[in-house]
Image: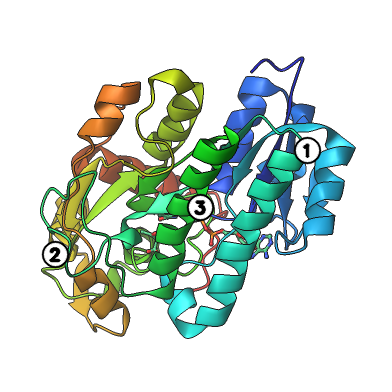
Amino acid sequence: MTSETATILVTGAAGQIGSELVPALRENFGQHKVIASDLVEPKADSLREGPFEKLDVTDRVQLETAIKKHKIKRIYHLAAILSATGEKNPVKAWEVNMHGLFNVLEAARELEVKQVFCPSSIAVFGPLTPRVNTPQDTILSPTTMYGVTKVAGEQLSDYYVKKFNLDVRGCRFPGIISHEALPGGGTTDYAVAIFYEAVIHNKYSCFLRPETRLPMMYMPDCLKSIIKLMEADFSQLRHHSNFNVTAMSFSAAQLAAEIKKHRPSFEMSYQPDFRQAIADSWPESIDDTAAKEEWNWEPDYDLARMTVDMLNVLQEKKNQGKLVYPG
Ligand code: NAD
Ligand code: AKB
């Protein structure tokens, strides 16, 4: 896709991933070629610098109006309710995640949108799935409504690929760690909160047990995976909307120990809550060989490199009085 021929719509653009994906896409395709959209006005300055549409993905008319108005050719569909929020309100999670995706796919088919990206999640896996080095093609047995919608979303997306030849792609993301926008209500959010708390209070009370080990990825790798997958030759892909991708796996205690290497007086305590059961149902590590083979996926950040970068960026923001954190 070239910037002359196509305009891009990003749904859920004010969220954790959208706040960084939109500037990255604008850098690649041009400021006015990328339309950010969300239910809420974006907080990030970087998002306010280009076009924005207030848009509810569960409203098909609003969605189609925006697609027609901007002659959209590619959609990055990020609007969703994540695992922890979804367990508090499963009906809303179904409504946003399923009806939102159905609207996006139907609008894309009818209005000749060329490409759709829709992220899936490690939440598609469950207690019946092998937990270590979880294979690409394996048992999907989610225990959360979020996971149920992600399994159904993968199946629905693959249906549109087969039935209508629509180009739909997606990764099963692990927990994403970042420092621009805070995560929006997931189980892996602790791995972001810990850095803010380390920089602000030098201590953190974790809602997961110390031995809980989950797959994770730093935001630059998340953006890299999205951009690389969307550039891949469609005819070479054997999978479409469900690529396992990962960069590292660590337990809550290992992350605390890594932070302590840089801040020796950092203190971690543990008060597990309802999110522990969700984390216990997810893999410890996942096998992303299919992504490596089909579109040359390779992450750049491991735990050590990501930790140094997170602490440096957040400390710098704090020094400049720009660190916004509700805790
Ligand atoms: P987020 O919660 O930070 O952002 C989601 C955005 O969607 C929010 O800004 C919210 O306002 C918006 N939204 C909610 N309902 C909407 C509606 N009806 N219409 C329009 N917008 C609506 O989520 P994120 O972390 O940026 O995740 C983006 C995608 O990536 C989701 O599909 C999520 O499941 C997936 N994912 C994220 C992670 C992660 O760790 N961040 C991991 C795996 C998968
Ligand atoms: C969540 O914890 O819900 C997300 C995810 C892994 O999908 N971060």
Q: Respond yes or no on whether mark 2 lies under 8 Å from ligand 2.
A: no
Identify the residue under disc 2. 253
What kind of element bears circle 2? helix
Direction from residue 190 to residue 3 in the image, left or right: right
Which x, y percent locates residue 109?
Answer: 69, 40
Q: Which amino acid does the dot numbered 1 rest on?
A: Leu
What kind of element bears circle 3? helix
Q: Which amino acid does the dot numbered 2 rest on?
A: Ala
Answer whether residue 207 is visible to the viewer in this image: no
Identify the residue under disc 3. 156
Q: Nearer the viewer, mark 3 or mark 2?
A: 3
Of label 3 and label 1, which has the lower sequence position?
A: 1
Nearest the viewer among 220 and 327 is 220
Of label 2 and label 1, which has the lower sequence position?
A: 1
At 37% from the left and 51% from the top, the residue drawn is 177
At 47% from the left and 66% from the top, the residue drawn is 82
At 22% from the left and 38% from the top, the residue drawn is 302
Which x, y percent locates residue 25?
Answer: 61, 30
Q: Are marks 3 and 1 in contact (CB under 8 Å)?
A: no
Q: Is residue 284 above or below residue 237?
A: below
- How far apart are the alpha carbons under marks 3 and 1? 18 Å
Answer whether residue 80 is visible to the viewer in this image: yes
Query: Residue 111 — which label?
Result: 1
Q: Respond yes or no on whether mark 3 lies under 8 Å from ligand 1.
A: no
Q: Which amino acid does the dot numbered 3 rest on?
A: Leu
- How far apart are the alpha carbons under marks 2 and 1? 49 Å
Nearest the viewer among 119 and 113 is 113
Among the 4 quarters of the image, the one containing residue 246: top left
Query: Residue 250 — which label?
Result: none
